[in-house]
Amino acid sequence: MKVLWFANTCSNYSAGSSGYNGGGWVSALECEISPRVELGVAFITREPLESPVHSDPGKKVSWAEEKRHSVTYFPIFNGYDTSRADRFTTLLKGDEKQIFDLVQSYISIVEEFRPDVIQVFGSEHSFGLIAEHTDIPVVLHLQGLVNPYFKVFLPPGATWNRYIFESLSPAKVLHRLYIRKKWLSACERESRILRNIRHFIGRTDWDRKMLGRANPEASYHEGGEIMRQPFYDADIDAISGIPSKMTLVTTISEPTYKGYDLVLKTAKLLKDKYSIPFDWKVFGNIRPHFFEKITGIRTEAAGVTLAGVATAEQLVEAIAGASMYVHPSYIDNSPNGVCEAQLLGAAVIATNVGGIPTLIKDGETGFLVRKGNPEEMAERIVAVYRNKELLRRVGHSARQVALVRHDRKLIADSLMELYRQLCATDSK
């Protein structure tokens, strides 16, 4: 069986190299699936291709085929939006030309590789448009949905004008106008993609509900996600334990809906209202200035430490050695940060949004609080911290559930069975 993936990361193409999150869970899935099928992985790169570009006199393509680790990789060079001038052009004229050129590359790759099944990871980019150009079965793995995310893009108290003109630097204003333009374009494109694909993989009740609204005729398939290897390999007994000082860990990314403002507000309450010393480490590519401006709270003054982007091994050590893991997002379908923390036996306190209630049963495998409510989050953090037996019990229960939910073999077996089912169909 030949399977072609269109992925948002390079997966294992550059195994062991840099990148914000490496190949993430897609690379872990590749390790399980590649021995079972003839696998191709297509992905976007901003780096000029060093390999000779595949040439066909009748077509202009922008990809180069390269075989590594028994997998055929198709890096797709996207030379658009690489400069401020490019972004300004996109802002004025839109990204239709860019998307058209990318789709032509997708078509060429499909024609060259000739897969039996195509799997698209995520609906936020243009990969899903390939379904309009092939009769090969296409399945899309939901990784968050642009339209509902965009509705809560800005945290409470923020407006688009405030976000865009936070700085009067022309370059920064242009960049944020560009971000908004790209999101609006992605929202329109996602609606089109969801209407034109028949099969989807999801893992939360929220995934199923949102897909039902977007495409009531679609077939929904339950499918898990494999976490990064160090979270399975961790010696929990050797590195875990409730520290004497309250220690909180959060992994977060730059988008405003990820809730860094809630971190600041909650930390300030912990510091001002409760007489419990704490350390709160926030890992990720956070740019705090906007959040500090809308909350009036400085990161250092709130007792929060920005720890930057960490490796999986560093996160394992930090989370397993913390009192609890805190997830403050305003929306999420199935955040891997929560899942990884549960694999490590951490007690997780998270906002009750999106698909998180599928991952956490309140009081049993974690704790849920209302989104954007720092008072409730601070109160719950303190109450849970003071009940050490509850911390241990919930953390242990979360780990047992997560080990089954993220069982590598079960996930790979389920995906292979879906591939076989899709191969038996003639329609997309």
Image: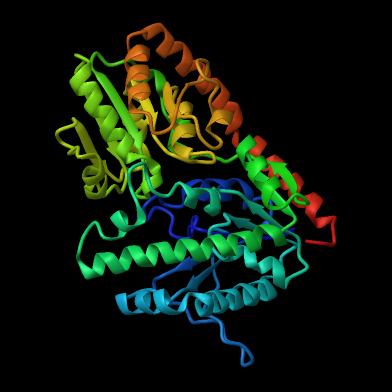
Residue lying farthest to the left in this orientation: 301
Residue at 19% from the left image edge and 14% from the top image edge: 275
Front residue (pair 40, 391): 391
Image quadrant in which you'd find residue 86:
bottom left
Left or right of 288? Residue 100 is right
The quarter of the picture where the N terminus appears is bottom right
The quarter of the picture where the C terminus appears is bottom right
Left or right of 148? Residue 428 is right
Residue 19 percent location from the top left of the image: 37, 55
Residue at 41% from the left image edge and 52% from the top image edge: 22
Left or right of 44? Residue 58 is right
In the image, residue 412 above or below residue 137: above
- Whether residue 67 is visible: yes
Front residue (pair 133, 75): 133
Residue 339 percent location from the top left of the image: 49, 33
In the image, residue 248 above or below residue 110: above
Residue at 32% from the left image edge and 44% from the top image edge: 284
Residue 128 percent location from the top left of the image: 63, 63
